[in-house]
Amino acid sequence: MKITVIGAGYVGLITATCFADLGNEVLCVEKIESNVHKLQKGISHIYEQGLTEILQKNLEEGRIRFTTDMEEAVKFSEIIFICVGTPQSDDGKADLSQVEDVSRQIAQYLNGYKLIVEKSTVPVNTHQWVKKTIARYAHEKSEFDVASNPEFLREGVAIHDFMNPDRIVVGVESEKARTIFEKLYLPFTNEGHPLLITNPAAAELIKHASNSFLAMKISYINMISALCEKVGVDVNMVAQGIGLDNRVGEKFLNAGIGYGGSCFPKDVQAFIKIAEDHGLEFGLLKETEKINAFQRRAFLDKIEDIMWINKDKNIAVWGLAFKPDTDDIREAPAIDVVRELEANGANLSLYDQEAMTNFKNIFPESKRIKYFEDKYQALKDADALLIITEWDEFKQADLKKVKELMRLPIIIDGRNIFEPSDMGEFEYYSMGR
């Protein structure tokens, strides 16, 4: 099938590349010319495991192209995925200006039936505004449908998630749209992956409801971890006991410094705002946010309790990305930690295998902040090591070497990557244990 993808950001590029790898012919339109030039050469402007390889393969085989020409993109196919940003406004509401702008451009270049698909995360009933906007600005009265097909991609394993979905959710209003989706997703349904077909409003709501529930689950176990510290219980044991109940499940029950990233913080706030706009109070989600903020504060308080005075202390930080296997630092806990420690006069040695370039945009190298290309180099003469992202390379670190390099063998682990019983050579502190 021919597919148009509007937007080559994280969701758009994964969507375009994976659909191409399934044998479709894909044209991806992106407004930033420098990104298009890179992508045409097989160079991805975002980090995601396996993305560069799959991108280059499909470029070589002629199944994917990139352009800045919106007219060409709209006229290329009858299936158009909208994958533009919906950033958070000051009041927590999603900024839909990019969605509106794209809808107007689609209207301008309509040349026959189009299935216009919201892939971006949008508030419930946005499809009605997309439909109304296209109808208002269309030069020709072409037939079209607006549908919702939310993404459920985890950064770091997004290609795996796209190719092996727990479920595919689509919201449609016509049999024609339904038939197109059934054909498009046939490679998945043939493999037993469920395709849930509902209406657009329900599909839009499912995305926010799913992410908010997962954020709530993380905050729940972090709330429990605070109690575990007070009463001398290992939160990992509690989480295991909870997770073995198949009604709960073990995923997203890892206590730590809290969630970050581009999805959970934004989607929780947007969902709260959606509820308020409809006269409802989502107090449960407000508490989810409070607990997440508390975890960052608790980690900073833990550092102060252990180190007493941070001024002029040499503190190494392992992990800057909000989660492993990504270079994304949006809403990353490391930002709050580094900002406060720098303000308190600490000397910070930072390391992350992928996120340092992005982090430097917020915290350039300075008298107090240094970046290192090797995790062990960052430890030289350190008074403490903070672990903020659970990269596998940290879990596999040579602890004997770590101890030899540090001035004081103090590890403050915000992700519980080590077992306390293995840390006898260190002053070891973790979350909820």
Image (cartoon, rainbow, N blue to C red):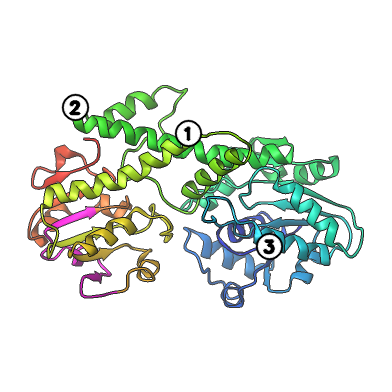
Instruction: Find numbered disc 3 in the image and state the secondary structure of the residue it sits on.
Output: strand
Instruction: Find numbered disc 1 in the image and state the secondary structure of the residue it sits on.
Output: helix
Out of 4 and 268, give the one closest to the viewer: 268
- Give the residue type at disc 2: Val
Q: Mark 3, residues whose alpha carbon is within 10 Å: few (<14), some, or many (≥20)?
A: many
Number of labelled discs?
A: 3
Say which residue label 2 marks: 231
Q: Quadrant of the C terminus?
A: top left
Q: Furthest-right residue in view?
A: 141
Instruction: Find numbered disc 2 in the image and state the secondary structure of the residue it sits on.
Output: helix
- Give the residue type at disc 3: Ile
Q: Nearer the viewer, mark 1 or mark 3?
A: 1
* Marks 2 and 3, the one that precedes in the sequence: 3
Question: Which residues make up the magenta segment?
Answer: 365-386
Q: Which residue is drawn at 8% across and 47% down?
A: 425
- Give the residue type at disc 1: Gly
Q: Is residue 187 visible?
A: yes
Position of 14 relative to 62 (above/below): above
Residues under labels 1 and 3: Cα distance?
36 Å
Q: Which residue is drawn at 39% across and 27% down?
A: 243
Say which residue label 1 marks: 283
As for residue 380 lying within the magenta part, the answer is yes
Rendering quarter of residue 337: bottom left
Say which residue label 3 marks: 6
**Residue 264 on image: x %, y %:** 48, 46
Position of 92 relative to 254 (above/below): below
Out of 223 and 402, give the one closest to the viewer: 223
